Image (cartoon, helix red, strand yellow):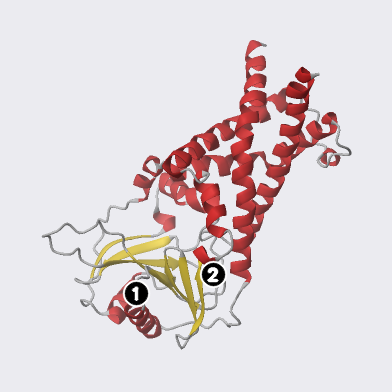
């Protein structure tokens, strides 16, 4: 019984203070998710048309030359039927003739930067980032504790109690319990993945691939030859994006690092995690450095591949964006009900 009492205290008191950070994260998450949905629904009045390797090579060469600041070129897909040139905080949409359709800078979207950094670090820099991470981990633990406390006295799931019938504390508490049960698993995943995004070193090592297979050679500094070599290696997959591989900052006196690019493929149009099959090619030497499909990763690598996508829907379908945004809406309501109930029962009663 002492264990149960301790868990109740932990769930109520620690949960009350963690609710403040979680409310901030969830409400800003609703905004960010809504903006992502609007972005995905905008097809720029374009119709999807498959492209040949020759066309993709020409597009790649032209865009990296025209926009030196960009890091990624994305080709049209059934989900996004236009070409994209992307850099950090900016995305340029183009048609098949490479005419600009729109230039989207996130810094120019009203309140976007404020909501994004509130979501990421509460506008407190690195301190806020780590505070957010540990609050997310504690939130995940609180979620598990709540499931355990409900399980001990469970009376079934009552959907009718999800929406409070009035503003009385008993009604709000029942709603908190039912809504909490309804979103407990996805909320736990969002909290845990939020923690892991900050502490990348815990899982990014499993994404590295050691290439033992013999990989084909391509012509040096020739986009068409290198794209064709990549496509020939995985003929059944669709090349959907090319990104500059990240390199260390050059040190004075040392020769510049060789250019390498990451090639991203989809196994099929309905793949759940997009751009999951990747290879890296040295542009200056025409050599493939590594090539690994998602299906060939070990279990640890497959799990690690989903850490960020599960949290912010990166490279995930629109349906998943709608799902986690809905979870954020329900989670915000649940936390508001619990905070109000706790305040009434503890602080307001003490004043009386």
Whether residue 318 appears in this view of the structure is no
Please give the name of the residue rendered at 34% of the width and 63% of the height, measured from the top-left corner.
279
Question: As rendered, which of 290 and 124 lies closer to the eye?
Answer: 124
Whether residue 23 appears in this view of the structure is yes
Please give the name of the residue rendered at 42% of the width and 42% of the height, measured from the top-left corner.
126
Is 159 on the left-hand or right-hand side of 182? right
The first of marks 2 and 1 along the sequence is: 1
Q: Quadrant of the C terminus?
A: top right
Q: Position of residue 207 (x, y in %)?
A: 37, 50
Q: How crowded is mark 2: few (under 14 residues within 10 Å), some or many (20 or more)?
A: few
Is 308 on the left-hand or right-hand side of 172? left
Q: Position of residue 36 (x, y in %)?
A: 59, 62
Question: As rendered, which of 137 and 279 lies closer to the eye?
Answer: 137
Say which quarter of the image contains residue 173: top right
Query: Which mark, residue 269?
Result: 2
Is 198 on the left-hand or right-hand side of 352? left
Residue highlighted by disc 1: 232
């Amino acid at each position: 019984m002492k264990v149960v009492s301790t868990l109740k205290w932990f769930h109520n008191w620690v949960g009350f203070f963690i609710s403040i950070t979680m409310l901030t994260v969830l409400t800003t998450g609703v905004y960010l998710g809504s903006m992502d949905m609007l972005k995905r629904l905008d097809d720029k009045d374009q119709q999807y048309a498959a492209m040949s390797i020759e066309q993709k090579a020409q597009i790649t060469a032209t865009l990296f030359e025209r926009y030196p600041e960009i890091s990624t070129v994305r080709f049209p897909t059934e989900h996004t039927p236009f070409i994209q040139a992307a850099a950090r905080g900016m995305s340029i949409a183009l048609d098949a003739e490479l005419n600009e359709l729109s230039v989207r800078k996130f810094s120019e979207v009203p309140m976007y930067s404020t909501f994004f950094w509130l979501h990421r670090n509460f506008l407190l820099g690195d301190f806020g980032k780590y505070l957010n991470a540990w609050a997310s981990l504690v939130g995940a633990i609180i979620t598990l504790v709540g499931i355990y406390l409900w399980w001990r006295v469970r009376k079934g799931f009552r959907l009718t109690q999800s929406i409070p019938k009035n503003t009385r504390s008993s009604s709000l508490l029942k709603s908190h319990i039912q809504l909490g049960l309804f979103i407990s698993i996805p909320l736990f995943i969002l909290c845990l993945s939020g923690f892991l995004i900050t502490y990348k070193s815990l899982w990014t090592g499993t994404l590295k691939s050691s290439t033992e297979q013999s990989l084909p050679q391509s012509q040096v500094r020739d986009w068409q030859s290198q794209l064709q070599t990549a496509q020939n290696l995985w003929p059944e997959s669709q090349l959907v994006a090319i990104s500059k591989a990240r390199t260390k900052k050059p040190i004075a006196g040392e020769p510049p690092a060789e250019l390498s690019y990451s090639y991203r493929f989809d196994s099929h149009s309905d793949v759940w995690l997009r751009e999951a099959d990747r290879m890296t090619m040295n542009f200056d030497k025409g050599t493939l450095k590594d090539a690994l499909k998602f299906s060939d990763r070990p279990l640890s690598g497959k799990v690690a591949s989903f850490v960020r996508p599960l949290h912010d829907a990166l490279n995930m379908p629109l349906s998943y964006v709608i799902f986690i945004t809905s979870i954020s809406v329900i989670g915000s309501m649940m936390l508001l009900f619990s905070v109000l109930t706790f305040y009434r029962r503890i602080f307001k009663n003490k004043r009386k």
